[in-house]
Amino acid sequence: MITVTEKAKEKAIELMEKDGKPVEAFIRVGVEGGGCSGLSYKLEFDTEIKEGDKVFEDKGIKIVCDRKSFLYLVGTELDFTDGLNGKGFQFHNPNASRTCGCGESFAV
């Protein structure tokens, strides 16, 4: 399962409303090759569920992930921070053996 914190939920809802996303919009998370640690996180709003997608709901937010990315993201929590050391969504991934300083890429 992939989960969201209360703060990430609130920010996602705010951004979807601000961007005029339809009610059926959800958060799509994924992984792609690249970044300084080897793999990079992908995060976007989407409205189309594709064949093989894993679908989760946490705190009223629907989260969708493709099957391949899910192998790297199982157990991950999506958070949002607006502190002095950075602002934005963060992945707390228990499968990552190493992450880069900015938190946008990781290795397993």
Image (tube, rainbow, N blue to C red):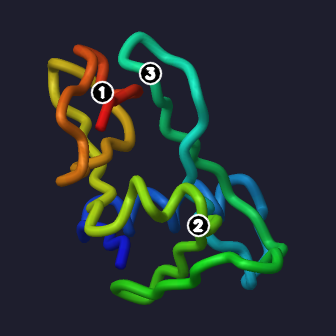
Mark sitting earlier along the chain (2/3) = 3
> What is the three-letter code of the residue carrying label 3?
Gly
Q: Quadrant of residue 21?
A: bottom right
The residue under label 3 is: 38
Picture coordinates of residue 91 (x, y %)?
Answer: 31, 47
Question: Which mark is nearer the camera, 2 or 3?
Answer: 3
Kindly identify which numbered label has been placed on residue 103.
Answer: 1
How far is the residue under mark 1 from the one under mark 3? 12 Å
User: Could you tell me which residue is drawn at 49 percent across and 39 percent down?
Assistant: 41
Q: Give the x, y percent position of residue 107.
A: 32, 30
Residue position marked by numbered label 2 in the rendering:
65
Q: How many residues crowd mark 3 within 10 Å: few (<14), some (14–19), many (20+)?
A: some
**Callout count:** 3
In the displayed structure, 37 sits above or below 103; it is: above
Of residues 14 and 38, the one drawn nearer to the viewer in this rendering: 38
Check disc 2 and give the amino acid type: Cys
Give left or right: position of 2 versus 86: right
**Of the residues shown, which amino acid type is indicated by label 1?**
Gly
Percent coordinates x, y for residue 101 in the rendering = 23, 14
Q: Nearer the viewer, mark 1 or mark 3?
A: 3
Say if 2 sits above or below 35 in the image: below
Rounded to the nearest angstrom, the CA distance separating label 2 from label 1 is 19 Å
Mark 1 closeness class: few <14, some 14–19, many ≥20 residues within 10 Å:
some
Question: Image point 38% across, 68% down: which residue?
Answer: 9
**Dot placed on the residue nearer the N-terminal end, 1 or 3:** 3
